[in-house]
Image (cartoon, grey):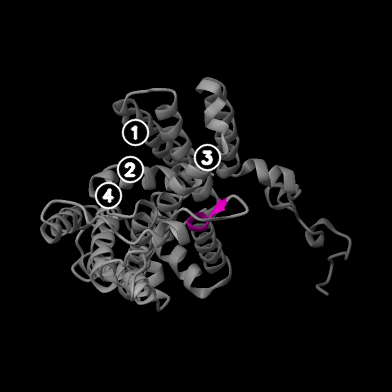
Amino acid sequence: MSAGVHPKSPALSPQFDPDLRAVTPKTALQRFFSETGTWILILDIALFVAFGFLSQDFVFWSKLNVESLMINGTEALLLALGLAMLLGAGAFDLSVGSNLVLSSVLGALTIKSIAGPADAQGNYAHLGLAIALGVLVCLVTGVIYGIVNGVLVAYFEINSLIATLGTMGVGTGLALVVTGGGDVTVLPTQLQSGFGLASLFFVPYPAILALVAAFVLWAVLRYTRYGVRTLAIGSERTSAERAGIDVKLHLTSLAALAGGLAGLAGFVDIARYGSTAQAGHVQDPLVAITAVVIGGTLIEGGKVSIVGVIWGTALAVILQTGLIIIGAQSFYQLIAVGVVLIIAVGLDSYRVRRTRDR
């Protein structure tokens, strides 16, 4: 002990900075209501109730319409999940809709060519093989499409918006060239009865598939190194590179993942309709982006909310379907979704500014 200094003197007394003292942790309820996704869920419920009262004979609440909402949300959710993972790393993909279309076209052509003509009873000689290969073609097409996007963005260093805007046109054009500008029709009805329109306890099989995919990605982000690296790249790419992460390879793998989910959505599409629907996916990128951003995923990267993506997808689907049921013109649907997207991006920017100012 130094001479002349009393052990109880102020010089040796612990000094506390009031700003560094322990902060009372939030309760579970406080954390719940501090999440953006929670407020989107509340808005979903409010819109569901409102459209029910506004619809004739409360048809919006009918079992048939609720199942339709879940099926409509399946494809949108699959696309939004892939986009959310990319946004987590600070990348973007405008081509998810055209990827879905191209994958569905090639998958449908595969199923139709292998299954062959039906017999008098409506049975196909190679139905099982045809469907299995159709699923595989959809997935492989989607993954290859995604890898092309990833290589353009990661290795050729083309801005992701520009690169995927270009591949969106290429993918849509290829689908039209392959089909001669029309849709692939008269697919085996078993696609619809066995999967596309089938349900378990009133929940359609495609919706269950999409929710399983959401749960897997939630677990990946929360518990795996892959998820940590995804968010690290989105938070600060230079720091991630210095930490030894192969950023280019990782971005390409995320683009392949998003492509695979788009390919899976393509198979859901043909299983639902029994044909392709090339003209029905113009708004897919808009709906997916809206669902992701309004659900709490930062457009600048570094944060992904899978639960928020689910509620954001529900919001977009409820809004579109509700406007149709109450008789609103199709252009009002575009306006409504566009306004919601602008509000979502505005809130996203506000959250980022608040975080930086703290």
* C-alpha separation, residue under disc 3 versus residue under disc 1: 27 Å
Residue 64 is tagged as 3
With respect to residue 351, does 210 lie above or below?
below
- Whichever of callouts 3 and 4 sits on the residue coming sooner in the sequence is 3
Q: Is residue 205 magenta?
A: yes
| Contact between labelled residues 4 and 1, with CB atoms less than 8 Å apart | no
* C-alpha separation, residue under disc 2 versus residue under disc 1: 8 Å
| Contact between labelled residues 1 and 2, with CB atoms less than 8 Å apart | yes
Q: Measuring 51% from the left and 23% from the top, which residue is drawn there? A: 55
| Contact between labelled residues 3 and 2, with CB atoms less than 8 Å apart | no
Asked which secondary structure carries label 2, the reply is helix
Q: Position of residue 171 (x, y in %)?
A: 18, 58
- Identify the residue position indicated by label 2 in the image: 286
Asked which secondary structure carries label 4, the reply is loop
- Identify the residue position indicated by label 4 in the image: 277
Within the image, what quadrant is residue 340 found in? top left
Asked which secondary structure carries label 1, the reply is helix
Q: Residues within 10 Å of mark 1 (few under 14, many from 20)?
A: some
Give the mark toward the camera: 1 or 4: 4
Give the mark toward the camera: 3 or 1: 3
* C-alpha separation, residue under disc 3 versus residue under disc 4: 21 Å
Which residues make up the magenta segment? 203-207
* SS assignment for the magenta stretch, majority: helix
| Contact between labelled residues 4 and 2, with CB atoms less than 8 Å apart | no
Q: Measuring 17% from the left and 58% from the top, which residue is drawn there? A: 175
